[in-house]
């Protein structure tokens, strides 16, 4: 199993800083920021998915066929609201 992946999983950052907690709650995004806390991640399973990902088609190539993750899948699994105002921010770069 990939040593970098194991190191990353062992050193996952803690919950979001209290400085932004109110903003995340106001945007109904607090629960998403805390997903995975207390979950055991399986490095071997993650490695298998990484190996089967094809970036040129944005799909996983599995023994049963191709599989992709859509934005609707993410919305349903994370319980995100798709109604209401869009939350955006401008990003500036020195370049």
Image (cartoon, rainbow, N blue to C red):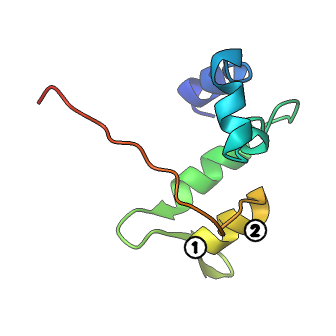
Q: Could you tell me which quadrant the C terminus lies in?
A: top left
**Vertical position of residue 24 compared to residue 6: above or below:** below
Direction from residue 35 to residue 5 in the image, left or right:
left
Q: Check contact, mark 1 vs mark 2: CB within 8 A.
A: no
Q: Residue at x 72, y 19 (%)?
A: 14
Q: Write down the residue under mark 1.
A: 68
On the rendered structure, is 70 left or right of 77?
Answer: left
Does residue 50 appear anywhere in the picture? yes
Q: At which x and y percent is residue 36?
A: 79, 38
Tag of residue 76: 2
Q: Above or below — where is 94 with respect to 91?
A: above
Of the pair 33 and 29, the residue shown nearer to us: 29
Classify mark 1: residues with Cα within 10 Å, few (<14), some (14-19) or many (20+): few
User: What residue lies at 54% left-to-right and 61% top-to-bottom?
Assistant: 52
Q: Residue at x 82, y 31 (%)?
A: 37
Q: Residue 23 appears at what percent x and percent y?
A: 64, 33
- Could you tell me if residue 69 is visible in this image? no
Please state the horizontal and vertical placement of residue 90, each as a whole percent of the image: 33, 42
Front residue of 85 and 37: 85
Query: Residue 13's quadrant in the figure?
Result: top right
On residue 88, the disc is none
Which residue occupies the foreground of this view, 77 or 53? 77
Image quarter hosting the N terminus: top right
8 relative to 34, above or below: above
Q: Earlier in the sequence, mark 1 or mark 2?
A: 1
């Amino acid at each position: 199993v990939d040593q970098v992946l194991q190191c990353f999983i062992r050193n996952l950052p803690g919950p979001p800083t209290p400085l932004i907690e109110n903003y995340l709650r106001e945007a109904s995004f607090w629960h998403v920021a805390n997903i995975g806390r207390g979950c055991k991640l399986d490095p071997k399973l993650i490695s298998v998915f990484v190996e089967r990902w094809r970036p040129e088609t944005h799909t996983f190539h599995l023994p049963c066929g191709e599989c992709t993750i859509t934005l609707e899948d993410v919305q349903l699994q994370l319980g995100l609201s798709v109604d209401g105002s869009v939350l955006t921010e401008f990003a500036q770069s020195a370049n």
